[in-house]
Image (spheres, grey):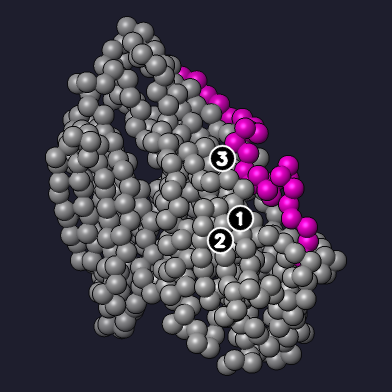
Amino acid sequence: MDTGSGFRQYGRSFLLLAMAAVIASCSRAYDPAIERGAEYQFRQGYPEVRMTALGYLDEEGEGVISIAADITDGTLIFRERDGKNVADIEIEIRITGIEGSHYSDTYTESKTIKSVSNGFIRSPEVVQFRRDKKVPPGNYEVTISVTDKSSDRSTSRSTKSFISDPDEQTVSLSALQLLGVNPDRLREGYTPITTYHASAATDSLRFVTQVTSTESEVPLTIESRLIRFEADTTPARSMSHPNYSPSSSPYKGIDFRNKDVIDQTRRELDQPGSVMIEFRHKRPGRGNYRFEVRAEGSGADEEEYRARDFSIKSENFPHIKNPRELAEPLVYLMGDREYRELMSIEDPDSLKEAVDYFWLSNVGSIDGARQVISRYYERVEQANKQFTNFKEGWKTDLGMIYILFGPPWYVTTRLNRMHWAYSYDRENPNYNFIFERPRMPNEHFPFNHYLLQRSPNYFTVQYQQVQGWRTGHIVLAVM
């Protein structure tokens, strides 16, 4: 049973949009003092855009909003022109004052993406767009819309930005900006990380905030900490296993109370004005982190606090490229012993050979193996873009079911429960899956964390689906 084919080209597109809408529509209380970056809101056939917009005061004391956007070029339509493959896009930036501000402005740019020029940096599979716009101090909503002129399809993303008024604020901290540098692309330098998820390919991280103080009678103390949170990092367990216990790490997901301080610094400022403060850290290992800054003193009534949450994922996240990234998702197709033996291979070339042998020996033909590999890892990457939270999307329960069975035919939600149906009979126990959230997303838990309601009855249907992948029948029979 493969729900990614057949009737299914139209149904697949529709259901991907439906699932994205279901997850994105959940109410998520947001702490304005904590930046978390954008999420991957994948919509098949539309430009994929992520953005940040951070406010600060320049050297002349004027307000500036620094806008950074990442556009995945694999979601654009490229056409050959003058011997080059190019994509034509239109970018619209709307800056609107909120909370008493009546400022409003719109900027539009038309661009042809083909090389490094005019504020664009071409990195593998990502076009990075940067613009600084001068605005008065205040609160703003910033929206960036990207239109692919070949398809006339647009994607819009919005965020809020704040610039303190130096004439009114005694002490203020701007939102923390997170930047990273890739050692393989040093000429690009540090570039903004627009999402919660940072790649393990990043060599070092830089956090930047602006401190504005109008008094200097009492020195301003700036304290920073880099914190790591305890979180589940394991792939989803079998559909027929018992459900997770409430005390287990997979059930809780991430525990913000269980944390380790990796590094901390303290410094003092004794001059009034606006100062950019930079903190640099070597990229930590895979996990979930918070970098926080506190400012106290100089007549402040209470401490000023800003933080940036982020996670370190696999090297090419959300894509699957290197041998270990290819091997890890095979956990859903292998027995425990077979998988342990695969993951014990440390040499990348040997690991790649073992992955290739797994597919070829099971499918039986090179052409067939290629088609099955393409479908399987396409599902893995889509799971990363749709279901990632504190861990990679392919490791979540939603991701496991999506990889094995494809997009559901029907999706229904109610409060903390989501129902995926892979049968016209919604009472069919074998092809209907219920997911429940242990807790609602909120200010202190800003993640959608759904767990499959497991049952021994799923043993046969999962076994049949796994065999369909291992033999290639799940893909080749419908081609």
Circle nearer the viewer, 3 or 1? 1
Q: Check disc 1: other Cα within 10 Å, few if <14, some if 14-19, many if 20+.
A: some
| Mark 1 lies on residue | 436
118 displayed left or right of 278:
left
Q: Check disc 3: other Cα within 10 Å, few if <14, some if 14-19, many if 20+.
A: many
Q: Check disc 2: other Cα within 10 Å, few if <14, some if 14-19, many if 20+.
A: many
| Mark 3 lies on residue | 289
Queried whether the magenta region covers residue 204, the answer comes back as no
Q: Determine whether 222 is above or below 379 in the image.
A: above
Which amino acid, mark 2? Met
Dot 3 falls on a residue whose secondary structure is strand
Give the mark nearer the N terminus: 3 vs 1: 3
- Name the disc covering residue 418, or none: 2
Q: Compute the Cα span from label 1 to label 2.
A: 6 Å
Which amino acid, mark 1? Glu
Q: Quadrant of residue 50?
A: bottom left
| Residue at horizontal 61 percent and vertical 82 percent from the top | 2
Dot 1 falls on a residue whose secondary structure is strand
Q: Quadrant of the N terminus?
A: bottom right
